[in-house]
Image (cartoon, rainbow, N blue to C red):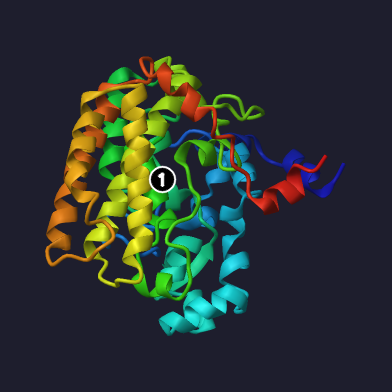
Amino acid sequence: MNFATSRIHRLKPNHYLLLLIILGLVIPGVSSISSEKMYATEPVAGAEKFTSLENTTTNKIMGIAAADCKKCHPSEVASWMKTVHFQSPDLRLYKFEGNTKKYANALGLTSADLLADSICADCHATKAIRDGKTKVISGISCESCHGASGGKEGWLNRHQSYHNSMPIPRAEETPEHRTARLNACDNAGMRRSSNLYDLSKSCFKCHLVGNEKLIAAGHKSASAFDFVSWTSGEMKHNFLVNKSKNADAPSLWMERTGGTAENRRRMKFVVGTLVQLETALRLRAKFTNPAVIPQLGGVTAAASGKLAQISAFAPAPEIQKVTTLMGPLLATLFIPQPNDNETYTKVADQIAEQAKLFAENHDGSKLAALDTMINQLPPHFSQQYKDKYLKN
């Protein structure tokens, strides 16, 4: 008999009763804590020490470590850690040499600046305020693509909370609660899998470069980014329903809507092209450097031409309106004009409206004619990923 056991055996009868009461209070609390690791309830976890970079009253970037996405998304996080998104600060920010140093010098940035509130960290990392200072806290993270998650009005806790007060499984959530939950997440700035327009916007905000000085220093104005191929390759992470299988489309979205991977690819192809064109036009509106404008003009013309092809294969009123809008602009894309800001911003706004309408009005089932074009876009993998994970 050990010391603890002997102490229990010496308890008087009334002490046994007290012990049982204490255990009765403690054990349910332990059970509740364990359950909350799997199913959140409505109250948002405290995040007051985190300060927002996007909005000081609602959205708070917490970072992959603080948000601890891997508790509920272990496979997604494991997949992310293999990508260049995860590695980006090591590849582009920590090593102050080569192109990194060249571009930093052109922008007047020091090596320390790159790991703080710099334009480089905007796209090559996730930033948050720690101890009152803006710092790089991780690679291009969940929040980089899905929106800043924390704070009392954030979506982090709410997006996995299936009841107002009880930790219950997803399958037991009522339709009314689900509608309220998703509306709250949308209002908090979450870019969910079902929102292809917002997701693609988060991609193109970095894959089209919006700084003329950076482009003039030799940085590419655009990466060879395609929304379909990139999200079908290295960046694919659709494990929620089956954590051992990386599905070809978001598994929860397919389960709930009956949507198919084929139809989603078609929608991504069209919506991604519309967003690429919108984003390029917004940048074209503010660019003034005659040496830089032709580069962006080329990107814009290519997106417009691709959209014209899409319209030829699968005509839709929204796409036809956009091609009509682009007609008068093609002659002046490469030449600065006095009213560029007003002209291109107005058309970009109109294209954004049509892109959202297209995403709302179509599901991809009538776009099979686009498969010939889409099949020419194999899943994209970076060279680093190929070297490490795809070797024979």
Task: Name the residue rendered at 24%, 49% in the picture.
Answer: 330
Task: Name the residue rendered at 31%, 32% in the picture.
Answer: 181
The image shows residue 352 at horizontal and vertical percentages of: 23, 42
Please state which of residues 367 and 185 is positioned toward the viewer in this rendering: 367
Task: Name the residue rendered at 22%, 30% in the picture.
Answer: 320
| Up/down of 227 relative to 87, above or below | above
Amino acid at circle 1:
His
In the rendered image, the residue lying farthest to the front is 331
The image shows residue 206 at horizontal and vertical percentages of: 42, 57
| Up/down of 162 relative to 14, above or below | above
The image shows residue 265 at horizontal and vertical percentages of: 46, 27
Please state which of residues 137 and 13 is positioned toward the viewer in this rendering: 137
Task: Name the residue rendered at 49%, 55% in the picture.
Answer: 223
Tag 1's secondary structure?
helix
Please state which of residues 194 and 349 is positioned toward the viewer in this rendering: 349
| Up/down of 198 relative to 90, above or below | above
Left-right relation of 284 to 132: left
Q: Quadrant of residue 367?
A: top left
Residue 279 visible in the displayed image = yes
User: Are there few (<14), some (14-19), or many (20+) residues within 10 Å of tag 1?
Assistant: some
Please state which of residues 81 and 236 is positioned toward the viewer in this rendering: 236
| Up/down of 269 relative to 370, above or below | below
The image shows residue 138 at horizontal and vertical percentages of: 54, 61
Residue 170 visible in the displayed image = no
Residue under pointer 1: 146
- Quarter of the picture containing the C terminus is top right
- Quarter of the picture containing the N terminus is top right
In the rendered image, the residue lying farthest to the right is 1
**Labels in figure, total:** 1
